[in-house]
Image (cartoon, rainbow, N blue to C red):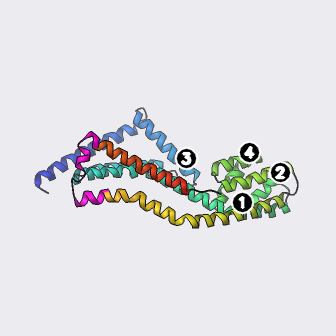
Amino acid sequence: MTGLSLAKGACLTLAFSAVACAGWALAADPDAWPGRFRRRYVAWLDAALAALFLPPHGRWIGLAQWLALEGVALGGVWSGRALVGLAVVPVVVAPAAWLRHQRQRRVRLIDAQVDSFLLTLANALRATPSLGRALAHTQRLVPAPLGQELGRLLAELRIGSDVDAALRDMGRRVGSEVLDAALLAVLIGRRVGGELTRVLETTAATLREMARLRGILRAKTAESRAQLWVLAVAPVLVLYAFDAVRPGYFDPLRQSASGWLLSGLAALLWVSSSLIARRVLSVKL
């Protein structure tokens, strides 16, 4: 790299840094629209983290994203390759994707605990007829993450919430179909009457069998899901490989309206085919 290119890059770096600082200053102003957007975004991150029982670090996540975006912009300036700008997409969607992954992982862990939760609750109901006391006893025996959700349910009961309402709120909050089925069995058993412990034991056995069938289904579709990921990532890797080996290979596509149109159409087909394949493989019992 020549001295002129270094000077140009240094000037552009200073300019980007100044723009980034000015943008962060606007985002820190609560009256400006960037500040309002930042406040809503940080509040959404904090709420999503609180639902996962994680510390509210939404402010630091937003700051890390801002610095990463500036790094991507500087990388594109210094390398001179427009494809570096594609890194903006993972930087923007990374927090939401991570939160969704953590939520799905938490739901899977809760699904695996529902069987033992029902059996523990049934045993507790044999010792006490009060569902609230039985839930309190069960919460001490069930580990996280389901134990954390039960702790929040008991906190709602202590402030005067109805048991049925608290159970329904817990089901909506967690978003687990398996837990919803278990809580529905508890609610129906309370209203209909009869031996609730036997209802819970039967429900636990049914959910155990459903979990076994879901495991078989996941094993049968594991290879197809792996192929889907390979086919989805391959076009991006091919683009970067061609751009690295033959710089300027894709310049004709960026120099005409028809080139941009074909690129957009190809990207649309790539995304839509990946979504359709993912939907086909998301078989549910």
C-alpha separation, residue under disc 4 versus residue under disc 3: 21 Å
Which sits earlier in the primary sequence, circle 2 or circle 3? Answer: 3
Magenta extent: 239-258
- Residue at which label 4 appears: 165
| Residue 240 magenta | yes
Which sits earlier in the primary sequence, circle 2 or circle 1? Answer: 1
Residue type, mark 2 in image: Arg
Q: Is residue 13 visible?
A: no
Question: Label 2's element?
Answer: helix
- Towards the viewer: 23 or 179: 179
Residue type, mark 1 in image: Gln
Tags 4 and 1 in contact by the CB under 8 Å rule? no
- Residue at which label 3 appears: 47
| Residue 180 magenta | no
Question: Label 3's element?
Answer: helix
Circle nearer the viewer, 2 or 1: 2
Which sits earlier in the primary sequence, circle 4 or circle 1? Answer: 1
Q: As drawn, is 26 to the left or to the right of 12?
A: right
Give the numbered dot on residue 139.
1
x, y (%) of residue 16? 26, 45
- Residue at which label 2 appears: 190
C-alpha separation, residue under disc 2 versus residue under disc 1: 19 Å
